[in-house]
Amino acid sequence: EVQLQASGGGLVQAGGSLRLSCAASGFPFDASAIGWFRQAPGKEREGVACITPSGDRRYYRESVKGRFTISSDNANDMIYLQMNDLKPEDTAVYYCAAERTLSPYNCIKMARVRGPEGGADFGSWGQGTLVTVSS
């Protein structure tokens, strides 16, 4: 059974940093695409960052490039999202998601397709963690 548990959210001032963690189990990291998504109040879910099954390519939505970094610790089954220079528009519930695949397609789609469709090919989702950025 695939399990994903996100944590690390909280309240931070604009310009601050947070690191989100996702504890994962039940699937092989080296044969899965793993992504972070978010949903702001009143808005659709959107992709934020994704790491390919090979672990050597990362994709980001344009608005977080240079500020967010996705990483994985395969030995400990953890995925992280380091968020720096946070802005009020980053306020959202953040989710980690995974899909067993050997292709980078899920990540490429996450980065290129707007809205929920960008994450439609991810079959396993964790509960979210709330990030609130105050101005």
Image: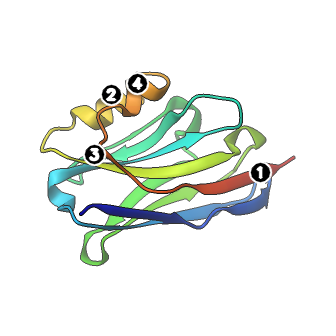
In the image, residue 3 sits, relative to residue 70, either above or below, namely: below
The residue singled out by tag 3 in the image is: 57
Instruction: Indicate which disc, 2 or 3, sits on the residue closer to the N terminus.
Output: 3
Instruction: Indicate which disc, 4 or 2, sits on the residue closer to the N terminus.
Output: 2
Mark 1 vs mark 4, foreground winner is 4
Element assignment for label 3 = loop
| Residue located 26% across and 70% down the image | 74
In the image, residue 28 sits, relative to residue 124, either above or below, namely: below
Mark 4 vs mark 2, foreground winner is 4
Cα–Cα span, label 3 and label 1: 28 Å
The residue singled out by tag 4 in the image is: 117
Which residue occupies the foreground of this view, 53 or 115?
115
Residue 100 position in % (x across, y down): 18, 48
**Tag 2: Cα neighbours inside 10 Å, few (<14), some, or many (≥20)?**
some
Cα–Cα span, label 1 and label 4: 26 Å
In the image, residue 78 sits, relative to residue 54, either above or below, namely: below
Numbered badge on residue 109: 2
Cα–Cα span, label 2 and label 1: 27 Å
| Residue located 66% across and 38% down the image | 40
Element assignment for label 2 = helix
Instruction: Indicate which disc, 2 or 1, sits on the residue closer to the N terminus.
Output: 2
Cα–Cα span, label 4 and label 3: 21 Å
Residue type indicated by callout 1: Val
Residue 34 position in % (x across, y down): 32, 50
| Residue located 69% across and 51% down the image | 85
